Image (cartoon, rainbow, N blue to C red):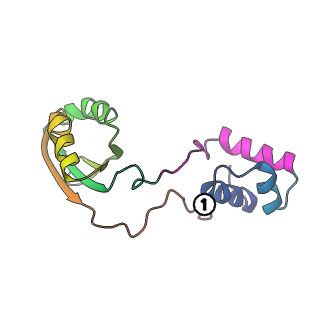
Amino acid sequence: MKLDKIDQQILQLLQMDSSISVSEIAERVNLSQPPCWRRIKRLEDEGYILQRTAILNPAKLGLNLVIYAEVKLIANGELANFEREVKKISEITECYVMLGNVDFLLRIVTTDIAGYERLYREQLSKLPGVQAFNTSVAMSEVKRSTQLPVNIQG
């Protein structure tokens, strides 16, 4: 299904604030409440909306360090084992399979360097099949967004 302008507006509003009421969305997109609710339901049913969630403030939780780790595996036979174990580590907030010189890119959040060292020693260094683990520390955040550009359609 191709998204029309109203669908795009609904998705944009929900990305900005998932707690917004259906009546507020309906008002902003110039629809009555029942058809607006049906559109939202359809967008959920068709998989455009995966979940509605709260975005937490990492600093309030003491998570002041972001690490990006490039991981090279010894052999491709370890892919499934590595992926299974990565999913168990809550500090790894994102994991991507990569094309190129490395096999995975991890985004890791933790308290500080000591917290990262502890995480590395206790869990990351024990991940199966790792040949090389190259980390970079993010010094500051320039942009972070969970919002996707919904008005771009190919």
Position of 132 with respect to 151 (left or right) is left
Q: Nearer the viewer, residue 142 or 85?
A: 142
Report if residue 131 lies within the magenta region: no
- Residue at image position (21%, 41%) is 119
- Residue at image position (88%, 53%) is 32
Q: Which residues are magenta?
A: 33-56
Give neighbour class at mark 1: few <14, some 14-19, many 20+ (Cα, 10 Å): some
- Residue at image position (34%, 51%) is 63
Q: Is residue 61 above or below residue 79?
A: below
Residue 41 position, x and y percent, is 73, 41
Residue 12 position, x and y percent, is 64, 59
SS class, disc 1: loop
- Residue at image position (22%, 51%) is 70
The residue that disc 1 covers is: 150
Residue type at the position of mark 1? Val
Report if residue 51 lies within the magenta region: yes
Residue 132 position, x and y percent, is 12, 46
Q: Nearer the viewer, residue 12 or 153?
A: 12
Q: Is residue 141 above or below residue 128?
A: below
